[in-house]
Amino acid sequence: MVDTGHEYHHLFSIYVPIAVGVWLAIALATGYGLLRYRRRPGRVPSGRHEAQVPELTYAALLVGVAAMLLYFTFTTESKVDALPRKPGLVLHVTAGQWNWRFNYPNGASVVSSSLHQRVMQVPTNTVILVKLHSVDVVHSLWIPERRIKKDAFPGADNELKLTFPKAGTFSGACAEFCGLHHAEMRFGVKAVPRPQFDAWLRVQAGASG
Amino acid sequence: MSTIAARRRAPAWTSVIGATDHKTLGRNLLIAAFAFFIAGGVLALLMRLELAAPGMQFVSHDTYSELFTMHGSTMIYLFVTPLALALGVYLVPLQIGAADISAPRLANVGFWLYITGGLTLESGFLTAQGPGKAGWFATWPLSTSGATPGTGMNLWVLGVIMSALGMIAIGVCLLGTIMRRRAPGMTLLRMPPFTWTQLVTALMVIGGFPVLVLVMTLLYLDRQGVHIFNGFEGAIDYQNLFWFYGHPVVYVMFFPFVGCALEAIATNTGRRLFGYRLFALSLLLFTALSMSVWAHHMYTTGGITNRYFAFTSTALLVPAGIEYFDMLGTLIGGSIIYRTSLLFGVTFFLQFLVGGASGIFVASPTLDYHAHDGYFVIAHFHYTLFAGSIFGFFAGVYHWFPKAFGVTLREGLGKLHLVLLIIGTNMTFFPMFFLGQEGMPRRVATYPRSTGWETLNTVETVGAFIIALAIVVFLWNVVVSLRSHVAAGPDPWDGQSLEWATSSPPPRHNFDVLPPVRSYAPLLDLKKAGEWPRRRELEETPA
């Protein structure tokens, strides 16, 4: 089971130290240049304005860094993007101005709107296939704790794999600006163990039916 | 005396309406762009006031949508892009030894299309339903007449079309000038670094902006009931077309300022730009890549090939990295004077690097699935589009102000301006990385109190007002410096390129005599050979 949160943090722990390291190295080199080569009487600026071997070596190093980052990105992306053949749960999500409707296979549904934000439930340790579409403008389903989002378009389903390795309640939001009540188009996700989820789902189906 | 008398006879309004002198045009463009910057900045301050605390305090949701739409639209269509080209209109003919730009009347038409477009876009505020409110990229179908009705939104679309046409006209004039009007001896590889940045900028304007005109025209027709876009494919088509303009334009809003920063740095280190040939090559590589990275704005749409765009976007670090090498190579081994222009130039590189490094981060689809449309991306693109333009712009302003106005800006106020801008920029935009990481979506007027995002948002709001204070200090510096009447002379910084070989401000025809051009730093060559007076000698020569 692929944990999107874990995959994100794995990649984050590669990218961010490199970014911070590069920033510090360039800032230190800049500071060194500024202090060491401050204008003083008698200091003649160097006439050298090209050094092809260091320049091209450096360019090759940059190509190497880009290739390495892409390698890590592509290996992670293939895990996060791969859609399950046999999902443990198929969840149909319909977005509209300004509400989310979560439809479960047994007919149960939860609607979270900008006026009444509600919490839907999902089972932990289950591969969930989300089929997502919109009835009006573009929306985007974002569960920040899972480090993932996917846009909802009118006219076709987008598919997204979700997994919840740990139980807990997380917040969800619409990420794509969708008009007046975009800010309030939020929902909650409660991840619970499968038996508890099944019990909740039965009750929900009764309530909706 | 006779030229001054002749200039005084012409009424001022003719030089505004019918300007064909590139210096007048450039000055008009700069002033107009800066006025739009103040307007866009005020909109940003209103947004920051609303966001300082959770809940709704100052504005309604509807007004907030107008604020962020008009803030983004004003800054991108009406401030940074015209500003980038304005610098070129003013400086390129001077740097290449030309008497004027090519097709100056076309450039003037461009200026007026831009002004008319800008006023059309802003005039939406006067309509009953308010101005554009679908975001600066007006995602379809949110931008349809059904989802966002109103005259203001129509005016927004028309305003964008007109100002984009204006930019194309000016870009064409710049490209023509660079291709056809260079001084004898100035080959492409003898153009000053700033002119190189303007060349690639003009190429991107000409390559990218017609697509903006196209997509906005289609959107206008769509809003009038002509069915243009349809369903999922229609939404993806719109985004593809929009971002095909929308990514080159971010480099239009960056390259000219790299040019400003590098010229200020090179001049104040007393040596020519290091690694010039690879720099020119990196600009061309950057330009080519800029036309092939657009869909990294669309990783979460499920409608594009993410890996291709991850590949091209990550590859950007190669040409960008080369520019940093050239900056460092110029500093190290130089003889550096800590002038405000140099300090702004160096700060430009370090501040932009925060945006550049976070840009490589969001170029990774897996990381972008979280960052996209959240405050992480807001932080990223304000470090690139705000810090990555305005620090370089001010490096250029402190560097070339004496050329344009005949007096230098005050160094003390300049350094205060710089320090305030650094503090304000980082207080405003750095906390946004953390808010984005925690899941704050963009374009929200409020956030739940339970999120605990209030402290960071309050810090950002204070930072935004410090930026405003820095801009006030700058404007004050302009006012007191213009009043000083201490002539800067033709070459106050010991300049390296041709613009320093003529008077400040230059005459209508720019040059009485053109010095020979033997490299990309022609004046430096002559000074080294003892054929041109250095700054100190100028001071010692009795007037």
Image (cartoon, rainbow, N blue to C red):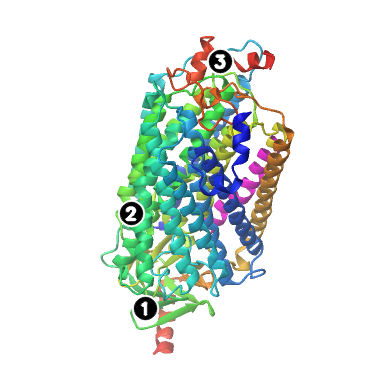
Query: In the image, is residue B207 part of the stretch drawn in magenta?
Result: no
Q: Is residue B501 left or right of residue B420?
A: left
The region drawn magenta spans B415-438
N-term mark: 2 or 3: 3
| Label 2 CA crowd tier, 10 Å (few <14, some 14–19, many 20+) | some
Magenta stretch, main secondary structure class? helix
User: Measured along the vertical axis of the image, is residue B509 above or below residue B162?
Assistant: above
The image quarter containing residue B303 is bottom left
Q: Secondary structure at mark 2?
A: helix
- Residue B65 appears in the figure: no
N-term mark: 1 or 3: 3
Residue picked out by circle 3: A45
Q: Is residue B499 left or right of residue B298?
A: right
The image quarter containing residue A159 is bottom left
Which label sits on residue A104? 1
Q: Is residue A155 left or right of residue A21?
A: left
Residue drawn at (59%, 42%) of the image: B10
In the rendered structure, the residue with mark 2 lies on which chain?
A: A
Same chain, labels 2 and 3: yes
- Percent x, y of residue B312: 34, 44
N-term mark: 2 or 1: 2
Query: In the image, is residue B425 part of the stretch drawn in magenta?
Result: yes
- Residue B139 appears in the figure: yes
Q: Amino acid at mark 3?
A: Pro
The image quarter containing residue B48 is bottom right
Residue picked out by circle 2: A79
- Percent x, y of residue B264: 56, 29
Residue drawn at (73%, 38%) of the image: B480
